[in-house]
Image (spheres, helix red, strand yellow):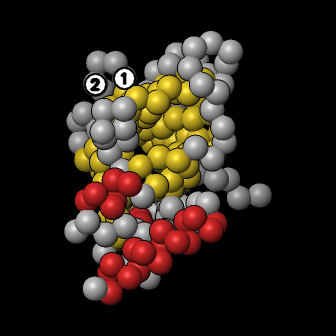
């Protein structure tokens, strides 16, 4: 019952604060988890398409081409699939502070996301299937289990800034970005 109370409190907080990094989801309530946002688009350029778990497709375009214009702050949900067109780019931030930059011709699936700011069993799983991704790991990497699935391996992330390139042929290049000290 305590978990349900926490979820209801978080839904109310979401309505009041739009999107707040203190949001949480429980794995035991799949329907609620799918309906609760786990992150948002911070900046979108070009064509970006989001496929929702209920088979609805939302096309967002910052250009004057087809689709509705994207607004900064559009929400993403567990089980969404994010695709970028050739000219597409997207920046997202998740409830735990994880931030992604996604380049053109990319595909990313938001498979799993459970985050409780006071919890120690947080978990996320994102599938990077095609394209270039740069991200800064958030609190899940430090307080739980952040995983990235690629065509060749699943990586456990514990807190770093990786750059991942998944080529059309399925090969993956992984590097860690290091900030130079001045």
Could you tell me if residue 127 is visible in this image? no
Q: Where is residue 5 drawn, in percent x and y?
A: 38, 82
Name the residue rendered at 34%, 18% in the picture: 168
Query: Which residue lies under the disc numbered 2?
Result: 170
Q: Quadrant where the N terminus lies?
A: bottom left
Can you tell which mark lies on residue 167? 1
Tags 1 and 2 touching, CB below 8 Å: yes
Number of other residues with Cα within 10 Å of mark 2, as a class: few under 14, some 14 to 19, many 20 or more: some
Under tag 2, what secondary structure?
A: loop
Could you tell me if residue 29 is visible in this image? yes
Name the residue rendered at 66%, 38% in the picture: 71
In three-dimensional space, the C-alpha distance between marks 1 and 2, rounded to whole angstroms, equals 5 Å
Left or right, 16 with respect to 32, comes to right
Left or right, 114 with respect to 72, comes to left
Q: Report the residue that reaches farthest toward the top.
A: 65
In the displayed structure, 21 sits above or below 164; it is: below
In the displayed structure, 2 sits above or below 136; it is: below
Q: Where is residue 174 drawn, in percent x and y?
A: 40, 39
Q: Quadrant where the C terminus lies?
A: bottom right
State the image quarter where residue 80 is shown: top left
Can you tell which mark lies on residue 20? none
Left or right, 66 with respect to 107, comes to right
Number of other residues with Cα within 10 Å of mark 1, as a class: few under 14, some 14 to 19, many 20 or more: some
Q: Where is residue 75 drawn, in percent x and y?
A: 53, 47
Q: Report the residue that reaches farthest toward the bottom.
A: 2
In the displayed structure, 95 sits above or below 121; it is: above
Q: Which of 143 and 84 is in front in this view?
A: 84
Name the residue rendered at 26%, 66% in the picture: 29
Name the residue rendered at 37%, 67% in the picture: 25
In the displayed structure, 157 sits above or below 77; it is: below
Under tag 1, what secondary structure?
A: loop
């Amino acid at each position: 019952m305590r978990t349900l109370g926490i979820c209801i409190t978080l839904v109310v907080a979401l309505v009041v604060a739009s999107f707040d990094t203190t949001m949480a989801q429980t794995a035991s309530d799949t329907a609620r988890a799918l309906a609760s946002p786990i992150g948002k688009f911070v900046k979108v350029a070009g064509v970006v398409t989001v496929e929702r778990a209920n088979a609805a497709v939302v096309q967002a375009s910052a250009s004057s081409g087809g689709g509705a214009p994207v607004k900064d702050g559009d929400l993403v949900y567990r089980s969404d699939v994010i695709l970028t067109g050739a000219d597409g780019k997207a920046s997202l931030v998740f409830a735990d502070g994880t931030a992604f930059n996604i380049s053109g011709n990319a595909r990313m699936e938001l498979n799993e996301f459970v985050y409780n700011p006071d919890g120690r069993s947080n978990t996320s799983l994102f599938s990077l299937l095609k394209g270039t991704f740069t991200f800064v790991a958030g609190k899940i990497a430090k307080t739980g289990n952040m995983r990235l699935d690629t065509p060749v391996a699943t990586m456990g992330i514990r807190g770093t800034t990786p750059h991942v390139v998944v080529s059309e042929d399925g090969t993956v290049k992984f590097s860690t970005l290091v900030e130079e000290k001045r």
